[in-house]
Amino acid sequence: MPKFGHANYQNPFERFFNYYFINVTKTMDNIRDWAFAIFLGAVFGLMVYKHWALPIGLAFSLILILFVLRFPYFAIVMPFYGVFFTRSLHVAAGINYNLLSWFLLVVFYAFAVLVILHRRPNIIDFTPNAAVWISTVFLCIYIMYALLAKYPVPWSYKAVGHLIILDFIPLIVLTMILTDHTEFEKIALAYIATITVIILISIFKYRVVAPSFLQRFNLVQGPPTSYGRSLAVGGIFSVWLFNRYKKVLIKAFAILIFAGCIYFLLKTGTRGSLGGFIIGFVIYFLLLKIPWWKKILAALVFAGIIIVYFKSGVAATMVMRIKSAIKGLEVATITRIYLYKIAIEHIKQSPWIGVGVGGYHNLVTHLLYYNYYPHNMPLEVWVELGIIGLVTYASLVILTLVRGIKIVINYFRTENPKYEMGLLLSVLFIFGLAVSQISGNIPWNYHFWFSIALVNAYYVLLKRETKNARVQNG
């Protein structure tokens, strides 16, 4: 090792960073891999507890991250926590990841359900609903078209696995086991705990690498899309945290999380995430049942903070970054229009049955320098699954949207603050729906799929409460 004063000398801190945050995090495909591994693991772990969800979630997240950073091969057990680590498994451990990862996922979900059923033997009041049936049909169509694809590619089958994890299993499991409002709040707290850890790591890495604001900031190598979406959702959740709890310390914590999410979201330069956040935040803020004078005051304070921040010299480079993102918007718009035209051309060739899951990937290989998907989920479903798949997909989305509207109406009809969680989940669905129109592909928009599961699970909970109230009232 070079001695002190040598040109290649690295102090212990530099060696620590280079090893853990460069060598190790390269094995992770994206921030979604560990963020959602922690999130889903914390969710299912916290469901069997009644109190202290936030500190337990923070402790769980920190321990899990430390294990991954200290022992890279610990990544092979990540699927056990219910998230897709297929590519990371292959890179980190050099093993045949498909069979092992799906096996561990099945084991995890079975274990989670058995533990919850053991602790709560009386929750088997689950009745199949329309969302579960439509999701089942869509999943069957997706699998069939993956097997019969005209141009099958390896990631087609992995995408099927992603859809099972993100849509089918969460929809059934969450609908069955989420039996009161506090459990939905635990999910929100677990997500906030995960975002807290992500922000802390972001601050640490940013202080070390000090990237230019003209460059997109990300925790790991590759596009920061998933990182940006996680921050956007975290910002919306922090508003719920601020309004839900009355303690000053919790409100201060929520403000810090909100500030951290916005700060790093702007640095990612992910326009879809930023646009989705603005839509979700505005809708949620306007629909909150708080006095209008408080809303106006909060808006003025927020605007004042922004003005002061951007008038300061510290924010000069941030302004440059935003201008750079706006300039890039024109290029992104032209590119997306081009991608939409390609997708529509292939839809015209096979409108009813499509080209199969993964078929679009091969069709556009010779047209673009990068194998782009359509960047619009309805178009992607239509071009690969045809009219049949599109109608089924649209049925699930429309059903969830209608149920989300009913949940919001219920929120305004009641005085109990616990129903604000329903408003939050409905806004999360709107965020995912908006982003999926301009960014990502079917498995990539995991926030969207998970919000579908949560909204439908919450709707089933409201139906249960209504049914129980009628029984009690005779």
Image (tube, rainbow, N blue to C red):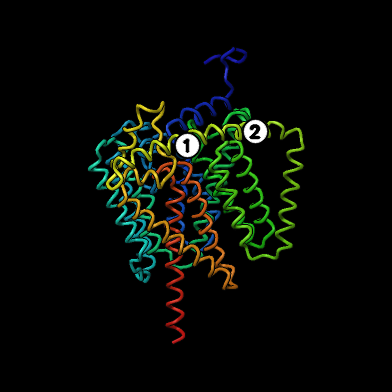
Tell me which amino acid carries mark 1: Arg
Residue 63, position in %: x, y?
49, 44
Tell me which amino acid carries mark 2: Lys
Task: Answer yes or no: is residue 210 visible.
Answer: no
Quadrant housing residue 266: top right
- Which of labels 1 and 2 is toward the front? 1
Name the residue carrying label 1: 336
Q: Seen from this angle, which residue lies furthest top? A: 6
Residue 252, position in %: x, y?
68, 53
Residue 219, position in %: x, y?
53, 35
For the residues bearing labels 1 and 2, Cβ distance under 8 angstroms? no
The structure residue drawn at horizontal position 47% and vertical position 68%, both measured from the top left corner, is 180
Residue 301 or residue 323, whichever sits in front: 323
Residue 127 or residue 140, whichever sits in front: 140
The structure residue drawn at horizontal position 50% and vertical position 46%, both measured from the top left corner, is 435
Name the residue carrying label 2: 323
Task: Answer yes or no: is residue 250 visible.
Answer: yes
The structure residue drawn at horizontal position 38% and vertical position 28%, both measured from the top left corner, is 367
Residue 297 or residue 255, whichever sits in front: 297
What is the C-alpha distance between the residues marked 1 and 2? Answer: 20 Å
